[in-house]
């Protein structure tokens, strides 16, 4: 992923438990602050969502967009790319999970967002960092809480 933001956090759970939370899109509005509504549009042969619509309300910014997902067969990686959006030209991201010891997993979140409106790259990177920080901390709270 060219020009992206990547951050990691250690979560006190096994890979499978974390990936189950990541894959549980209908419950995102209960723990992802900006998610107003999340709808699974298509499911793959593995039973996981392959296309998901998000209605996001982050105060000054609202967007409705669709992401296409790919899930690694070993359950340690999920990646996505933008299918459609009101505000975004492109979005690519991933969660990579690596078991440290039983009950402890390193979660690495990579994100690249390109908006349809021009934005200074420094501000774009700062926004991506804020998004990845919040996502990782919310995920950790949800899994461990």
Image (tube, rainbow, N blue to C red):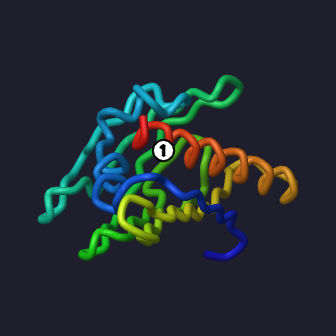
In the rendered image of this protein, does residue 117 appear above or below residue 141? below
Residue where numbered disc 1 is placed: 139
Q: Is residue 45 left or right of residue 145?
A: left
Residue at 29% x, 69% y is 75
Residue at 78% x, 57% y is 125
Residue 30 pos. (x, y %): 40, 26
In the rendered image of this protein, does residue 33 appear above or below residue 93? above
Q: Quadrant of residue 74?
A: bottom left
Check the picture and name the quadrant holding the N terminus.
Answer: bottom right
Q: Is residue 23 left or right of residue 37?
A: left
Q: Is residue 137 left or right of residue 100?
A: right
Number of marks: 1
Check the picture and name the quadrant holding the C terminus.
Answer: top left
Q: Secondary structure at mark 1?
A: helix
Residue at 84% x, 59% y is 121
Q: Residues within 10 Å of mark 1 (few under 14, many from 20)?
A: many
Residue at 80% x, 51% y is 126
Residue 21 pos. (x, y %): 34, 46
The front one of 73 and 54 is 73
The front one of 139 and 66 is 139
Residue 69 pos. (x, y %): 35, 61
In the rendered image of this protein, does residue 73 appear above or below residue 127? below
The front one of 60 and 26 is 26
């Amino acid at each position: 992923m060219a020009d992206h933001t990547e951050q990691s956090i250690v979560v006190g759970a096994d890979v499978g438990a974390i990936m189950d939370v990541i894959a549980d899109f209908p419950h995102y509005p209960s723990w992802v602050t900006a998610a107003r509504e999340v709808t699974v549009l298509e499911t793959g042969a593995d039973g996981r969502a392959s296309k998901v619509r998000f209605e996001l309300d982050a105060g000054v910014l609202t967007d409705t967009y669709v992401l296409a997902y790919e899930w690694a067969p070993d359950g340690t990686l999920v990646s996505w790319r933008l299918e459609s959006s009101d505000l975004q030209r492109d979005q690519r991201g991933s969660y990579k999970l690596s078991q440290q010891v039983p009950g402890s997993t390193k979660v690495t979140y990579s994100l690249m967002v390109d908006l349809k409106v021009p934005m200074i790259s420094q501000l774009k990177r700062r926004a991506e960092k804020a998004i990845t920080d919040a996502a990782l901390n919310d995920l950790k709270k949800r899994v461990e809480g």
